[in-house]
Image (spheres, grey):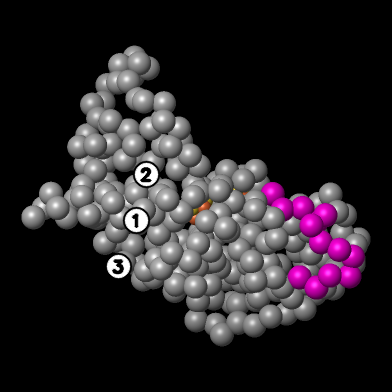
Amino acid sequence: MKLTLKIWRQNGPDDKGGAVTYPIDGVSEDMSFLEMLDVLNEELIAKGEEPVAFDSDCREGICGMCGVMINGEAHGPERVATCQLHMRSFRDGDEIVIEPWRADAFPVIKDLCVDRGSFDRIIQAGGYISANTGSAPDAHATPVPKNDADRAFMAAECIGCGACVAACPNGSASLFLGAKITHLGEFPQGQPERDARVMSMTAQHDHEGFGGCTNLGECSRACPKGIPLNVISQMNGDLLRSLRHQS
Ligand code: SF4
Ligand code: FES
């Protein structure tokens, strides 16, 4: 395939940045999207130009490092992480616009790389659970109802990629936050700090400059892990409960 790439280039957080056009030839439909960017970067390096900076690590949809806007959609046209997107989703002759996540709480570091340290600080604000340490307890020592375990594992699939924020017109991280609150709130071990956790994590979310949720649902539609909107309802329920307990 022969493609035209329009890629956001930005030297650093304070640079204005802008789109640069790169024609690319010989792209196989079996390549992943990131492999296609690798090929472009090899060409740029061979010409003595600076390669395009982008994040990736596992390239298996697990770590959440990758993620760019592709033709205006977070992670592109399929509901997968950018590293799992393949070039067969595009046609010969296509023009592909590639930009970094756009959100105040995710400042651009360089080109397509953004700083998602705000997510780390939200998780950090969640603190710890007061489970005893020591040797591993017997697997069945604390029974967990099957439905609770399934829901916790569903929420735990969130890889922290940030697509939900990039897709949300409000720049809200409510889906990410709801996934973390649901994941920890479903287990018996997560109960002692449940109230404190939701209070401090939501406060950190707002402090980081993420927007509020207005139930538009763009986050869930963009999520490569299919995290449902109802984790946000669960988070709001937990927040109300903790406020009632305080009063
Ligand atoms: S909720 Fe989905 S889109 Fe948001 S960070 Fe988690 S995996 Fe990514
Ligand atoms: S590189 Fe790890 S999820 Fe894409």
Which label's residue is closer to the chain start, 3 or 2? Answer: 2
How many C-alpha atoms fall within 10 Å of the one at disc 1: few (<14), some, or many (≥20)? many
Tell me the quadrant of the picture where the N terminus can be found: bottom right
Based on the displayed image, in which of its 4 quarters is residue 90 positioned? Answer: bottom right
Name which quarter of the figure residue 207 lies in: bottom left
Residue 55's place in the image compared with 206, above or below, is above
Q: Is residue 48 visible?
A: no
Residue under the image location 48 percent in, 39 percent down: 154
Which secondary structure lies at badge 2?
helix
Residue 190 or residue 120, whichever sits in front: 190
Image position, residue 123 (x, y; %): 35, 51
* Distance from Cα at disc 3 to Cα at disc 1: 9 Å
Task: Spot the residue most to the left.
Answer: 247
Q: Which mark is residue 122?
A: 1
Q: Residue at x 28, y 36 (%)?
A: 190
Residue at 75% in and 61% down: 37
Q: Which residue is mark 3?
A: 207
| Residue placed most toward the observer, 184 or 38 | 184
* Residues shaded magenta: 84-96
Q: Position of residue 246 (x, y in %)?
A: 11, 53
Q: On the picture, is 164 further left or further right than 240? A: right
Q: Amino acid at mark 3?
A: His
Q: Which residue is mark 2?
A: 182
What residue type is disc 1 on? Ile
Q: Which mark is residue 179?
A: none
User: Are the residues tagged 2 and 1 within 8 Å (C-beta)?
Assistant: no
Q: Earlier in the sequence, mark 2 or mark 1?
A: 1
